Image (tube, grey):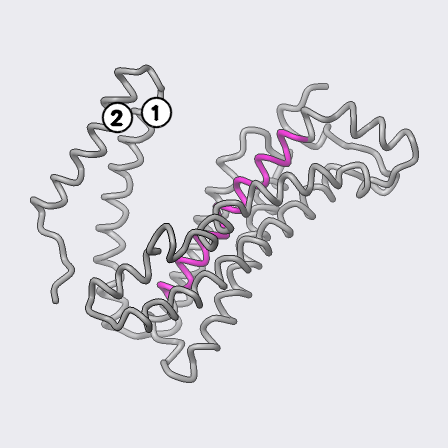
């Protein structure tokens, strides 16, 4: 069973994006420009990646595979860093973003790959790159959303946090509720995916395998395995990001250091 889409079918699907942008323009929602740019960027990126992966899959060189994964992690780290409206001063914004994305992605991806090693060659690019890519995307989104929530919350709740510190609370106690909000915000997407999988939606991996003619039960098992990975990597990513960011924005004397945050109100 062929699952490829013709050029005409892709054009028809693109009309939906153009229509959505038109609706945004008509209602003055302000998202039409970013939607069209993102859609165009996606098309170019995916076509380039498709051609690149075709060549890499043919070579089956583990070092090339590792190099590509490293480049993907570097790009994701930059994206997380660049998306923040309020950023840690200096190189710290990229350091925190990179540490959260790389550590969580590498740990969960290696765990996943060694788990599938019993049935497949885990060094094969056809196995390693898709797993690392899916895990990396979730890690990037969790870190980006969580850090945004954390930074915005620190600025908005500055007076309340400093009041708790003045009353003798430790820096951890003073920001505990903010940490909880940031963690919830960063992981809510994956939590919703897990809660709705099967009943509300058929997630991507399962849908793709079913369309390819795979046994639905086997496809369901593959999706369960993947969702466990995504739940783990989103949690790890946001915990690392929050911990490192708060470490920079507080000090050993239990003071709030928003002078280390670009764009914070003095």
Q: Earlier in the sequence, mark 2 or mark 1?
A: 2
Numbered badge on residue 16: none
Looking at the picture, tell me which residue is in the foreground, 236 or 55: 236
How far from the left and from the top, in percent, is residue 163? 85, 26
Q: Secondary structure at mark 2?
A: helix
Q: Quadrant of the C terminus?
A: top right
Residue 33 horizontal side relative to residue 242, left or right: left
Q: Residue at x 85, y 31 (%)?
A: 164
Q: Residue at x 57, y 43 (%)?
A: 94
- Work out which residue is located at the far bottom of the displayed protein and give it: 118
Relative to 159, does residue 122 appear above or below in the rendering? Answer: below
**Which class describes the residues within 10 Å of circle 2: few (<14), some (14-19), or many (20+)?**
many
Numbered badge on residue 31: 1
- Work out which residue is located at the far front of the displayed protein and give it: 199
Residue 228 horizontal side relative to residue 29, left or right: right
Segment tinted magenta in the rendering? 129-153
């Amino acid at each position: 069973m062929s699952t490829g889409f013709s050029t005409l079918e892709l054009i028809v699907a693109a009309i939906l994006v153009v229509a959505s942008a038109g609706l945004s323009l008509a209602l003055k929602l302000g998202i039409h420009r970013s939607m069209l740019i993102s859609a165009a960027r996606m098309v170019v990126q995916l076509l380039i990646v498709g051609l690149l992966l075709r060549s890499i899959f043919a070579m089956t060189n583990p070092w090339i595979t590792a190099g590509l994964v490293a480049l993907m992690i570097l790009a994701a780290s930059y994206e997380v860093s660049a998306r923040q409206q309020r950023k840690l001063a200096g190189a710290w914004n990229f350091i925190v973003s990179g540490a959260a994305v790389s550590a969580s992605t590498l740990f969960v991806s290696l765990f996943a790959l060694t788990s599938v090693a019993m049935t497949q060659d885990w060094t094969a690019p056809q196995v390693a790159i898709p797993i690392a890519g899916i895990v990396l995307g979730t890690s990037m989104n969790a870190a980006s959303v969580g850090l945004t929530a954390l930074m915005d919350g620190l600025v908005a709740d500055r007076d309340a946090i400093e009041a708790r510190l003045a009353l003798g609370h430790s820096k951890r106690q003073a920001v505990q509720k903010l940490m909880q909000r940031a963690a919830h915000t960063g992981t809510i997407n994956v939590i919703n995916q897990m809660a709705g999988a099967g009943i509300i939606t058929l997630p991507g991996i399962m849908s793709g395998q079913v369309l390819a003619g795979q046994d639905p039960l086997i496809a369901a098992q593959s999706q369960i395995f993947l969702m466990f990975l995504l739940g783990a990597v989103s949690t790890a990513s946001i915990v690392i990001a929050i911990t490192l960011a708060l470490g920079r924005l507080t000090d050993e004397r239990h003071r709030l250091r928003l002078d280390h945050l670009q764009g914070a109100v003095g």
